[in-house]
Amino acid sequence: ATAILAGDALLSLAFEILSEASTHPDANIRVTLISQLAKASGMAGMIGGQMLDISGDDTIQTQKLKTGALFRFACEAGATLAGADATPLRQYADNIGLAYQIADDLLDANSPSAEHHKAQLHQLTAAGIAALAPYGPRADPLRQAARFMLTRGK
């Protein structure tokens, strides 16, 4: 119960922070960020993905929504704040978000299709890293985060 309340409080805090003038001087940018986070965390994002997961729906769409939507928001928010093109970060987020869910599923269970999932995990990670090419070495921390998933344990 405490963990659920903490999660609720942190999500509310995120909206509070995004609404403050210190986040960005342009109110339109702040509203855009708030809208993006609302979609990423609500029924069109994480909560919707969790509902699909609870109902036993094990599809790529479920995986994209569960953590992928929030991961995408986190990656795109910096570009939104800077007024920059978020396309490479969106591609990174989509690939790495799905790779994260696959890695998490592989840690949870040993299935007959585990080898296929491991190959898919490597392909998604490589595609996510490749999407960061326009950023050069400045994106190395994101590359390291992507590679971490290949070796992480529970």
Image (cartoon, helix red, strand yellow):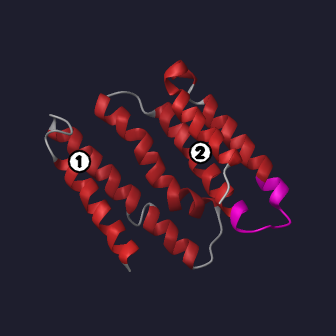
Identify the mark at residue 18; answer none if there is no mark. Answer: 1
Left or right: residue 1 versus residue 22 is right
The N terminus appears in which quarter of the rendering?
Answer: bottom left
Q: With respect to residue 115, does 81 lie above or below?
A: above
Percent x, y of residue 48: 46, 68
Percent x, y of residue 107: 70, 62
Rendered residue at 58%/23% (across/down): 133
Between 52 and 140, the one nearer to me in the picture: 140
Which quadrant of the structure image shows residue 12? bottom left
Identify the mark at residue 96; answer none if there is no mark. Answer: 2
Rendered residue at 41%/45% (across/down): 74
Label 2 sits on a secondary structure element that is helix
Rendered residue at 48%/33% (across/down): 87
Amino acid carrying mark 1 in the image: Leu
Percent x, y of residue 56: 62, 77
Which quadrant of the structure image shows residue 57? bottom right
Magenta residues?
A: 106-117
Q: How crowded is mark 2: few (under 14 residues within 10 Å), some or many (20 or more)?
A: many
Mark 1 in CB contact with mark 2 (< 8 angstroms): no
